[in-house]
Amino acid sequence: MSAPSPTDDPLVARFLQHLEVERNTSAYTVRNYGHALGEIAAWHQELRQAPPVWADLRREDLRLYLRCLGRKELARAAIALRFSALRTFYRFLLREGLVTGLPTKGLSLPKPEKRLPQFLREPQMDDLLAAPLKEFSRLRENSSEPVDPVPFLRDAAVLELVYSSGLRVSEVCGLRVEDVDRVAQSLNVRGKGRKERRVPFGRPALTALEAYWQAVHHPLVAALPVFLAQTHGLEPIQPGTVQRRLKVYLAAAGLDPALTPHKLRHSFATHLLDRGADLRSVQELLGHARLSSTEVYTHLTTERLKRVYDSAHPRA
């Protein structure tokens, strides 16, 4: 049975609006939580021939739903996402006085799988960063019509900033002109939960940004987006556009088009640690609330050192 739209349920719609407006939650989390709650509502409708009354659901109901997910052989991370949506939803309902308890409390969930984040090696990263301007040159040479360079200059600057500062795609899309200090080469980044952090960016990123601004005649008004969706317009670029454009450049660079913008963030962290950065500094640059979120990258560098050791040591 297909999941109903989250906006069909007024409580779910109110919750999603709370996430988006008051908690500044990423668009991806809002979408995923809405889809998860829609799935639960569809399951309840199919099982009981009625939509869920959230205040009436008990722990036993949610345990039943958990067993249902287990029979579908979903990945542990997928199950954890659905219950993260439920836990956050019920905490919201409790704060609003719409329920008297938390049926999610005490539920036993599968531990998440320990998967190492994917990243690009430094030469691969160099190829990707060069891809937008190479793609522009290729199109210009093979087209009988003029090719607008601005989208390619913009994309080059987006990729440079994401990699240079370890930004989430939502963060780079949310940058405003006033967030960029070109003299100090630093950004004021608004991350998850409206938390702000100051991060540096490198000279290549600054050069790419200024080339884009000059080409588009970007008005340097404080509140305007750094990256515009259209050459003629003032709307910010959207994460979906960045994802689609990235696939083009990954293919052009001979890399896996399935890689996401978040892999550039993984590459940023891994390359810093490979070159001697300390874990706490990388945590601050990434905007991680917990050090454990950053520690996963140490496994990547450890694995690399093991490979170097095995291939180079005479008694490995």
Image: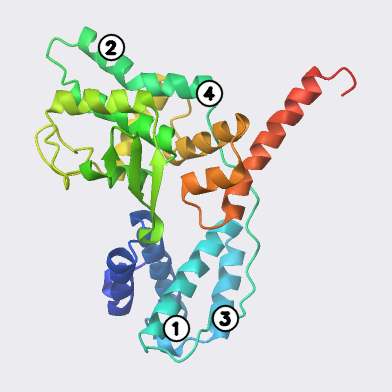
| Secondary element at tag 2 | helix
> Mark 2 or mark 1: which is in front?
2
| Residue on which the image places disc 2 | 138
Which SS class for mark 4? helix
Separation of marks 1 and 3 at Cα, in angstroms:
23 Å
Q: Report the residue marked by disc 1.
A: 48
Image quarter (top left, top right, bottom left or bottom right) of the C terminus: top right
Q: Position of residue 157 (x, y in %)?
A: 30, 29
As drawn, 7 above or below 236: below
Q: Residue at x 50, y 35 (%)?
A: 268
Q: Are the residues at dot 4 and dot 2 in contact (C-beta closer than 8 Å)?
A: no
Are the residues flagged by discs 3 and 2 in contact, CB closer than 8 Å? no
User: Extreme left residue here?
Assistant: 232
Amino acid identity at mark 2: Arg
Q: Which residue is mark 4?
A: 122
- 4 vs 1, front mark: 4
Relative side of 257 to 209, left or right: right
Alpha carbons under labels 4 and 1: distance apart: 54 Å
Residue for badge 3: 105
Give the class, few, some or many, for how many residues have Cα within 10 Å of label 3's Cα (few <14, many ≥20).
few
